[in-house]
Image (tube, helix red, strand yellow):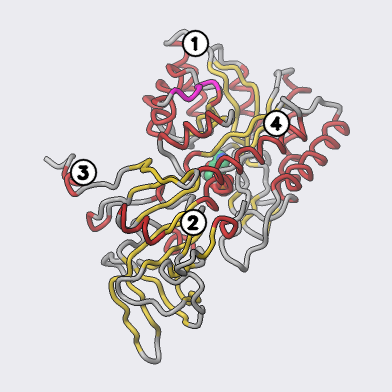
């Protein structure tokens, strides 16, 4: 599912998202506004689930990496689609279990989980805790013993493969704050320590090699390294390693310049190498897991803003000032991320201008994009920024004491609020 598949131009020339008039949405719910399409999210989840089952049968699980977009409704949808979920904090875990998400389908990640977070994970009965460091192995063993539980864990490994967008590096990836390094022997040390902990059951390994990755090769390379490690661990320790989790990071098409990604083909390529490698090593194919976040929700969402003013600085640039900014979408200021925009009130207008889309915060770096192709935009108009479903709402802040926007979900030609807009009173709630 691509963002462009959800967009059309209505009879009045307005931008329709999933068949609904975006100018009317902005009028009804206010701006800035996150708008997401439920069917697109479900289709993305199904596409991954089907692909994994095609590759590995039932011995597989797709976990939605909920940091991409976390709220009660997304856990309800993931639960309804029968997939698992990744969480990385007590907040995400509590949100999931508050809507009765099955705890045994939750993987708890994080490189510095607090004791309270680990206790919550144990008490909720999460399916797997992805342990990140030696300290955590010791702490979790102690806490599990205290509760008279046996914690099922996997260890986060640095496979020595890191990837970003179109490049990947096979070696030298030990400089990361996440997980255990293979090269230094740290990973094997962790295995031996965990295997000796009475209250831990080491059942698998996990890795995550990067984000917005367009090619299958880096995943296949990581899978090979991880499988070699599994074979080595089984030989040296006899530990019953059942699962291999290859993480997330599958790319989406943000702008027209990005190519489309076919997640089924992607999965088939990785599965082929995985199976070949298992045969070569003489080990059974593990229970395979992946954790897509961005590619489940990213292309299912847009953000609507109202233009407040336009500043044309001759010889320099044209700023279009909107009523949100890096408080609701920090991705340009964080990583120079690129977006396409459309004028919601004249969706088919020529893109004959080049603009800088700037927010309302007191920071010059508060931009959604620079050198963006745009139609002429005027004060009062509505602008849609495309493919904002991932890492926008979940990364939103209250800088300058701006309330976070509402999230509206579309389905079957109807819209509903799934996250209310913060009020000014919400901003005062915790102040003494
Ligand atoms: C961020 C993350 C993911 C999801 O990454 P996407 O790029 O959103 O698919 C999955 N697993 C882990 C461990 C992560 O840190």
Q: Is mark 2 within 8 Å of ligand 1?
A: no
Camera-side residue of 410 and 351: 410
94 w.r.t. 207: above or below? above
Residue 95: quarter of image:
top left
Q: Main secondary structure of the magenta part?
A: loop
Q: Which residues are magenta?
A: 100-104
Q: Which mark is residue 288?
A: 4
Report, in whole angstroms, how far the alpha carbon at label 4 lies from the one at label 1.
25 Å
The label nearer to you, 2 versus 4, is: 2
Q: Quadrant of ligand 1?
A: top right
Q: Residue at point 59% right, 42% down?
A: 292
Q: Residue at point 34% right, 85% down?
A: 312
Report, in whole angstroms, how far the alpha carbon at label 3 lies from the one at label 4.
42 Å
Other-residue count near label 4 (Cα within 10 Å), few / some / many at <14 / 14–19 / ≥20: many
Q: Secondary structure at mark 3?
A: helix
Report, in whole angstroms, how far the alpha carbon at label 3 lies from the one at label 1.
39 Å
| Mark earlier in primary sequence (2, 1) | 2
Q: Which mark is residue 17?
A: 2
Report, in whole angstroms, how far the alpha carbon at label 2 lies from the one at label 1.
48 Å
The label nearer to you, 2 versus 3, is: 2
Q: Which mark is residue 426?
A: 3
Other-residue count near label 3 (Cα within 10 Å), few / some / many at <14 / 14–19 / ≥20: few
Camera-side residue of 402 and 31: 31
Left or right: where 302 falls relative to 285: left
Q: Which mark is residue 149?
A: 1
Camera-side residue of 365 and 346: 346
The label nearer to you, 3 versus 4, is: 3
| Mark earlier in primary sequence (3, 4) | 4
């Amino acid at each position: 599912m691509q963002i462009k598949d959800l967009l059309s131009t209505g009879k009045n020339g307005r931008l329709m998202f999933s068949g609904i008039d975006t100018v009317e949405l902005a009028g009804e719910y206010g701006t800035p506004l996150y708008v997401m399409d439920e069917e697109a999210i479900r289709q993305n989840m199904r596409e991954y689930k089907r692909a994994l089952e095609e590759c590995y049968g039932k011995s597989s699980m797709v976990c939605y990496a909920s940091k991409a977009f976390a709220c009660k409704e997304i856990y309800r949808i993931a639960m309804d689609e029968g997939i698992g979920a990744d969480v990385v904090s007590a907040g995400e875990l509590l949100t999931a279990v508050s809507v009765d998400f099955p705890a045994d389908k939750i993987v708890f990640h994080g490189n510095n989980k607090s004791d309270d977070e680990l206790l919550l994970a144990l008490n909720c009965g999460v399916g797997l805790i992805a342990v990140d460091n030696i300290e955590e192995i010791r702490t979790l063993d102690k806490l599990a013993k205290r509760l008279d539980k046996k914690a099922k864990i996997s260890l986060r490994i640095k496979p020595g493969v890191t990837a970003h967008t179109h490049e990947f590096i096979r070696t030298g990836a030990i400089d990361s704050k996440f997980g255990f390094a293979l090269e230094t022997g740290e990973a094997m040390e962790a295995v031996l320590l965990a295997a000796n902990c009475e209250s831990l059951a080491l059942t698998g390994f996990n890795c995550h090699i990067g984000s917005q990755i367009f090619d299958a090769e880096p995943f296949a390379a990581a899978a090979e390294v991880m499988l070699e490690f599994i074979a080595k661990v089984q030989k040296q320790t006899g530990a019953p390693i059942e699962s291999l989790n290859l993480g997330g990071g599958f790319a989406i098409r943000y702008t027209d310049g990005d190519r489309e990604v076919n997640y089924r083909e992607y999965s088939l390529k990785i599965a082929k190498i995985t199976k070949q490698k298992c045969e070569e090593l003489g080990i059974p194919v593990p229970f395979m897991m992946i954790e897509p976040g961005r590619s489940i929700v990213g292309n299912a969402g847009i953000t609507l803003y109202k233009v407040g003013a336009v500043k044309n600085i001759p010889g320099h640039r044209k700023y279009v000032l909107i009523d949100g900014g890096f408080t609701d979408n920090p991705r340009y200021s964080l990583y120079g991320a690129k977006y396409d925009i459309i004028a919601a009130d004249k969706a088919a207008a020529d893109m004959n201008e080049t603009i800088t889309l700037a927010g309302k915060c007191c920071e010059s770096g508060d931009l959604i994009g620079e050198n963006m192709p745009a139609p002429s935009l005027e004060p009062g108009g509505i602008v849609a920024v495309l493919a904002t479903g991932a890492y926008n709402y979940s990364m939103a802040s209250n800088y300058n004491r701006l309330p976070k926007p509402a999230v509206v979900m579309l389905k079957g030609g109807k819209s509903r609020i799934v996250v209310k807009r913060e009020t000014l009173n919400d901003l005062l709630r915790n102040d003494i």
